[in-house]
Image (tube, rainbow, N blue to C red):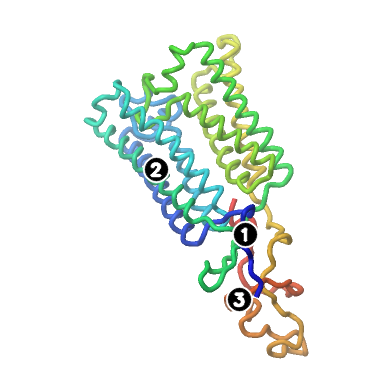
Amino acid sequence: MSQIHPANFTHQRLVLTRDARGFAGVLCALLALYTLVAIIRDIAEVGLHDMFWSWVYGAGFTADYKVTTQLDLQFLVLFLAGVAFCRTAAALPGLVTVGVLTVVLRAAPLLALVSIDAYDGFETVSYGKWALATLITELVLGLVLLLVVLVGRRPANAPTGPGGPPPEPALPPVAPKPAGAVASLLLLGGAALAGAAWQIYLLVDLEWDGYKYLLTGETPDRALTEVQPAVYAWAAVVFFGVAALAGAARSAASRPAGLIAGWMLLVVGVLDVTSYIDSDWFLDTDILGTDDVLWQLTSIYYIVAGLAVLLALLPTEPADHSGQPAPAWQPTGPGWGQPGPMGGPGAPAPGWGPGAPGAAPQQPHWGPAMPPGPPPPPQGGYGPPPQDGRQGW
């Protein structure tokens, strides 16, 4: 039996073990559930109307600070996407994205909450305790998620069998098509440049004495769980830039990172444009200055870019795995196993091949991979489920 030397794994793609994916899926589900409960809690407190407009205009729209912000809309889909990523062993890039964004965007407001004098006594009110519990809970779960991903990695082509992990059908995700890669590079790269340009403009316009409050969070009408405006902006700039470069390289991380970035752009753009339309100042050049018009145009760009990236990166067809490692040998010609009717091909020998129609696939427990035989004719309920790029992003 041929052996695969560990040194050969140095530059191979890493995947997650089945146990790690199961644990990560539970963590993402808990994060999604906690976020949903927080949103429902706020809606019960002030009603859906006020809750929505507080997401649009900020916490100052309602009489009291609330726990959730527009970031929670982004997080809810982010965590549900994390659950979806866990369906395949190629979940590692997507789960790393979920974990890093959770840790960064929850640690920043938590640090502000416990260190800024303006928030002294926040724990004496009910929503203050809930906000603190939300930040700590999601931060801890995000850190545990990253730890699980770190511990549960293994080379994609690691040998399986006695003493090793069981064989898995999951394959690495398909890289985006050239059009999707170009869309990621141009649109997400453009969003990163636009975000960086606006932060530099604000730094020059407000000078450091004013801009520093956007970094520390010492601003009026700010929700207790809201990320400091400049921290969120720079985190988004870095993330969009990384996603754009990953798309240009058509790497394994390009699809999950691009889809998450597209969703974030779409949410921010839609809520911002909603506020402009509601204020009757939407692209009104008679009232607005040049900088305000450019800001609104940037929000429109976020909507267009977010939608375009989502459409370009969503899997739409089965993947071509012709370049992937072949499964164990599957004899399909006559002369093997039981004779077929009318002298046709016989059934596969026990322990090899997909088995009888409707039966579970039979595979050897271990052994070197060999070239596959000709594909059998399609039959309903035959063989293992398809292994394609739609299992993961």
For the residues labelled 1 and 2, say whether their Cβ atoms are less than 8 Å apart: no
Could you give the CA–CA distance between mark 3 and mark 2, rounded to whole angstroms?
Answer: 42 Å
| Residue 33, x across and y down, in percent | 39, 48
Tag 2: amino acid: Thr
Q: Nearer the viewer, residue 196 or 378?
A: 196
Residue 342 lies left or right of residue 159; in this view the side is: right
Q: Which amino acid does label 1 sit on?
A: Leu
Q: Where is residue 245 in the image (x, y as percent from the top left)?
A: 65, 37
What SS does tag 2 mark? helix
**Residue 333: x, y in percent?**
76, 82
Q: Tell me the quarter of the picture where residue 281 sits.
A: top right
Whichever of labels 1 and 2 marks the residue nearer the N terminus, that label is 2
Tag 3 or tag 1, which sits nearer the N-term?
A: 1
Residue at image point 53% right, 58% down: 87
N-terminal label among 3 and 2: 2
Q: Residue at x 39, y 41 (%)?
A: 139
The answer to whether the residues at label 1 and label 3 have Cβ atoms under 8 Å apart is no
Label 3 environment density (alpha carbons within 10 Å; few <14, some 14–19, many ≥20): some
Quarter-wise, where is residue 154 in the image?
bottom right
The amino acid beneath tag 3 is: Gln
Query: What residue is pinned by disc 3?
Result: 363
In percent of width and height, residue 120 lies at 26, 24
Q: Quadrant of residue 116?
A: top left
In the displayed structure, 89 sits above or below 251; it is: below
Which residue is labeled 1 in the image? Answer: 171
User: What's the distance in space between the residues labelled 1 and 2, CA to CA?
Assistant: 31 Å
Front tag of 1 and 2? 1
Name the residue located 39 percent from the left edge and 23 percent from the top edge: 217
Residue wearing tag 2:
35
Task: Name the side, left or right, on which 142 lies relative to 280.
Answer: left
**For the view shown, which residue lies furthest in the left direction?**
124
**Quarter placement of the N terminus:** bottom right
